[in-house]
Amino acid sequence: MKKLVTVLLALAMAFTMVFATAASAEDGYKDSITWVIGNDQDILDPQNNVSNSKVMPQYYNGLLGYDNDGNVVCKMAESYEASEDKMTWTFHLRQDVYFHSGRHCTAHDFEATFDRLLNTENPQRYTSNASSFIDTAVATDDYTFVITLKEPKAFFLQAIAKQWAFVLNPEYIEKYGADLGKTAESVDGTGPFKCTQWDKGEVLKFEAFENYYEGAPLTHEIVMKIVPEQTSRAIAVETAQADIGDGVSPDDAVRLDALDGVTVSKTDGNGCHLFQFNCASDHAPMSIPAVRQAICYAIDRNAICEYLYSGLGETPIDSIMAPSVAGYSSVGVVPYDPEKAKQLLAEAGYPDGFDMTIMTSAMYNRAVEMAEIIAEELKEIGINAKLEVVERAVFTSAWASFTPDEFNEKFGWDMFIMGSGGDSDADTLLKRIMHSDDTNVNNYGFYNNAEVDELLEKGAVTMDETERNAIYARIAQITIYEDPFGAYMNLRKNVYALSDKIEGFAVNPSNTMDLAHMRCRE
């Protein structure tokens, strides 16, 4: 115990050199809140950002957004209506919205934003997703914006509430081009906070936008410090060097829960961990469905969750999406059955198993430990799995637009850890990772199943909820049991360590939040 206290004091002194003390406010609340996060942004451009769902909604807004319960709500649109055939959607904009630069925001700015997004000759990261269902997006006057679809889309409102539909300043699009969002100076949104500083890998600073249309944020400044190591983030909150910490580990959660002055927030998210398979057609034996089935049956998910996540309460997933996602249907947790796994391997022509590589990364909570356990379990059925632990930079660079041959020549991973989620609807979540369309850059495992493609396309336009849920239940049955897309593991919790002085902290299932209504007592 004495040793632990000594360590904590030493770390507290170290953190004091890193985290500046917030200035006192006359009203009894801090002017500044310090937040420690594990990963930095890749870019501050909502049409290309894939890093952190917490940041984009602070700098930018769109027509619609999400409340703390994950429901779609109006943001910059005061109201909207759809044509009878659900092909044309008309949005009526607020007239009191300004960019951080002072430019008055109108429907013409949305038109310029969507022109950039839908330009397939100069695509952004989410161009293929948006262009798959949006035909035209035009301003009919200063405060009326009309989106016409190629076909009815069941989850259109959920889709248009996402970050890729956030409005951009056309002047910044022209000025910065492909460099938009690469520096703090190139960020100009309509959100509650302005970006005042971005030192990559170190710090992001948010300053309250006093002219925000929903009212100025309660806290003048939020400072996000990049601290990759989990326990260091927990200690920063524990020693009052930070007010909020992301991604608390199970062990730290148990310890912090017992302390005065600290609260551990654990809420159900809409994401999960999975080990995706490399399904490229010439990538044997992983190209064989029975081999992937065998791997799925060889993993004891209940034991893994109990061992790794007992402090967080994470549980095995029983579908390809969380219960909070529209379109969810349970198909049951894959049972642990090593004998069946051995039988499937033998039927596939691999009675003695084979060698394989599993990529994992510490960027996901307990992912390395999870991969280690899976490797041991695979030994029981004759599969010798070598682990390759990579840094975040290597992990993200792998998802460039490689062909299967290029990917396998450069990396050659047979399984790789992924975080699936962050979406509130099945269509947006699944189509981008499972559909075999050549333009789908998010299908990292080169999954190709004609029935799944057809069902994904049908689910996107089926308006009846019962029928739509049946479609996604069939997709889950195929991609978990018949032709596995990956080994789905556990539902993820959104976990934060908070000072007890924090007020107004709330996180929705997509792990996004409205920081404008958060503050911290002195």
Image: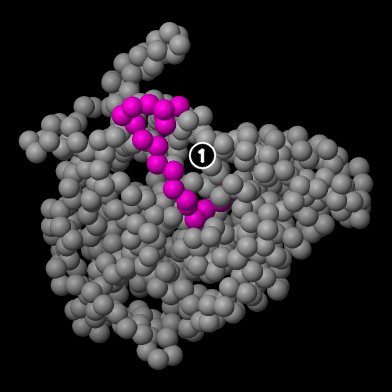
Q: Quick one: 23 or 248, which is closer to the camera?
A: 248
Q: Is residue 191 above or below residue 247?
A: below
Residue lying furthest left in this view?
Answer: 26
Instruction: Residue at 67% x, 70% y: name it.
Output: 474
Secondary structure at badge 1 equals loop
User: Mark 1 = which residue?
Assistant: 312
Queried whether the magenta region covers residue 495, the answer comes back as no
Instruction: Residue at 86% x, 40% y: name it.
Output: 382
Q: Position of residue 203 (x, y in %)?
A: 32, 36
Q: Label 1: few (<14), some or many (≥20) within 10 Å?
A: many
Residue lying furthest bottom in this view?
Answer: 84
Q: Is residue 70 above or below residue 277?
A: below
Q: Position of residue 31 (x, y in %)?
A: 16, 38
Q: Position of residue 52 (x, y in %)?
A: 41, 49
Q: Is residue 171 above or below residue 228?
A: below
Q: Quick one: 80 or 105, which is closer to the camera?
A: 80
Q: Is residue 318 above or below residue 15?
A: below
Q: Is residue 235 left or right of residue 204?
A: right
Q: Is residue 177 left or right of residue 24?
A: right
Q: Quadrant of the N terminus?
A: top left
Q: Position of residue 519 (x, y in %)?
A: 22, 43
Instruction: Describe the colour scheme in one phrase.
Output: one colour
Q: Which residues are magenta?
A: 255-274
Residue 404, visible in the rendered structure: no
Residue 325, visible in the rendered structure: yes
Number of numbered callouts drawn: 1
Q: Main secondary structure of the magenta part?
A: strand
Instruction: Residue at 68% x, 58% y: name it.
Output: 332
Q: Quick one: 222 or 113, which is closer to the camera?
A: 222
User: Residue flagged by tag 1: what amino acid is it?
Assistant: Leu
